[in-house]
Amino acid sequence: MNSKYVYPVVIFLASFILIIAGMAFKIQHWPGTSIIFGAGMLVQMFAVLWLIIVILKGDKK
């Protein structure tokens, strides 16, 4: 994998921790579910947008 793709992909995969934690909070009916789940979704959105920008920029020679 090209090194410029590593950070967005790692952040995208790591955001699943927040989403899984949000789901666990939802199942247990603990407060803070929407904040944790929303944060995970925002991090994923940021990572996807970053990856799209990196792909579209391409190699400038």
Image (cartoon, grey):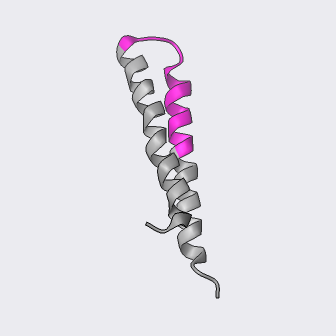
Image spot of residue 54 (x, y percent):
58, 68
Magenta span includes 34: yes
Q: Extreme right residue here?
A: 61
Measured along the vertical axis of the image, is residue 28 above or below residue 55? above
Residue 61 among those drawn in magenta: no
* Quadrant showing the N terminus: bottom left
Region rendered in magenta:
28-43
Q: Is residue 27 left or right of residue 37?
A: left
Point out residue 8 in the picture as x, y percentages from the top left corner.
53, 55
Q: Position of residue 22 (x, y in %)?
A: 45, 25
- Indicate the quadrant where residue 35 lies: top right
Of all residues, the one furthest to the bottom in this rendering is 61
Image vertical order of residue 28 relative to residue 43, above or below: above
Residue under the image location 51 percent in, 36 percent down: 40
**In the picture shown, does residue 60 fall above or below 9?**
below
Task: Tell which of 9 and 29 is nearer to you.
Answer: 9
Q: Quadrant of the C terminus?
A: bottom right
The residue shown at (51%, 12%) is 31
- What residue sits 58% from the left and 50% below the top? 46
Count numbered badges in the picture. Answer: 0
The percent position of residue 45, horizontal first and vertical second, equals 53, 49
Q: Main secondary structure of the magenta part?
A: helix
Residue, x 48% and y 40% (percent of image)?
15
Image position of 6 with respect to 22: above or below = below
| In-front residue for pair 28/6 | 6
